[in-house]
Amino acid sequence: MLVLTLQAGIAGARQWPMVVAHRGCWLGTEVPENSIEAVRMAARFGYPALECDVHYTKDSVMVLMHDFTDMRRCIRRKTDNSRVETPQPLSSLTFRELREDYVLASDNPAFREPVPTLEELLLACKEHHVMPMLHSDIYESYELAERMFHGKWVAFAGSQENLKRCRQISDCMILINVNDETAEEAMEKLREIGGKCGVSTMNYRLETSSFCHTLREKGYEVQSSIFPTPHDLLSTRNGASIVLSDFCYLPNSYKNRQKSILSEKERWQKASRLTDRGRAQSMGLTCWKSSIEDIWKLNLRVEDAMCLSAKPTEQTASGCASSDNSRR
């Protein structure tokens, strides 16, 4: 088996950001998003935190589901794993109906779990020492997270009023959504919340060096939210302190975990999202070529043999690990 240790770096970066697994660490059609298995996978890959989406069922039970207005992409029928053909909003089902009739979609029967409740996912986070980031505008979810994590969690993207209410019961980190605000306008909203707080945006054009440093110098956090490559890397250079990512290849100094072990075909398929133009195969990786020469640092530990190619010339490296793994 080929085992690779991947490390990526940005020259001159002061510190690595905290890395957050978007909807947990899900793997294509294998490990479902917002699932208990995605929590376990996040811990396995070394994420210190994960983001999850909280919504109510018809009878007001808090469960994890991103596509709450139409769940067809995320669920299958429990009886035969068939697709749901008609639109299925979460609000149309009671919790009992959701658990008795549906499972999360997965190509692997072992991962066809019931849609988890928020409490079940938070318990899994505690068990695997992963900090939860609640993408939620449900005040009740803040109360539950505070009871279980005592301030060591993140409230994310709720309404300004609900986040201000959250601050009254918790000293957790609170992140507000911004889109085109200036740093000064964002800080005005953050001052209303107080305590540990910051901003998150999906607009990579917003996170300039000036924007990030203005906020960071005042003690606020700056999160880049699922930016496309290379903008995810550039945001960390510009000063982003949190990276919310479907798959992150940055070292994670938050818990001093500096590597991710990639193996098996599914891991390579997941790694293909490292770059817009990157391609991953079961025995090789072709990386996106950046015009910024100092953006990549790639360390490989090979426990078999592999061929590396680089254009315009080809380089080949191969090695055979001995029984004590001393050869590289």
Image: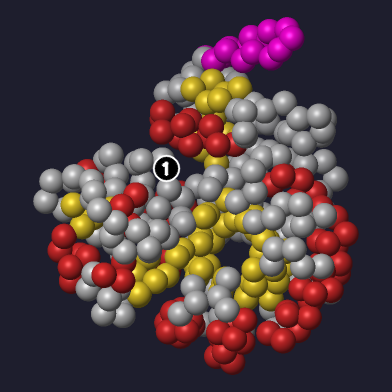
Residue designated by label 1: 27
Residue 127 is inside the magenta segment = no
Q: Please provide percent x and percent y for residue 26.
A: 43, 48
Q: Please provide percent x and percent y for residue 9.
A: 73, 40
Asked if residue 151 lies left or right of residue 87, the reply is: right
Q: Please provide percent x and percent y for residue 242.
A: 67, 59
Does 169 appear above or below 179?
A: below
User: Local crowd at mark 1 within 10 Å, few (<14), some, or many (≥20)?
Assistant: some
Camera-side residue of 246 and 75: 75
The prevailing secondary structure element of the residues shown in magenta is loop
| Quarter of the image where one finds residue 147 | bottom left
Asked if residue 153 lies left or right of residue 185, the reply is: left
What is the quadrant of the C terminus in the image? top right
Q: Residue at x 83, y 62 (%)?
A: 211
The answer to whether residue 310 is seen in the rendering is: yes
Asked if residue 159 lies left or right of residue 288, the reply is: left
Residue 309 is inside the magenta segment = yes
Does 265 appear above or below 66?
A: above
Does 295 appear above or below 68?
A: above
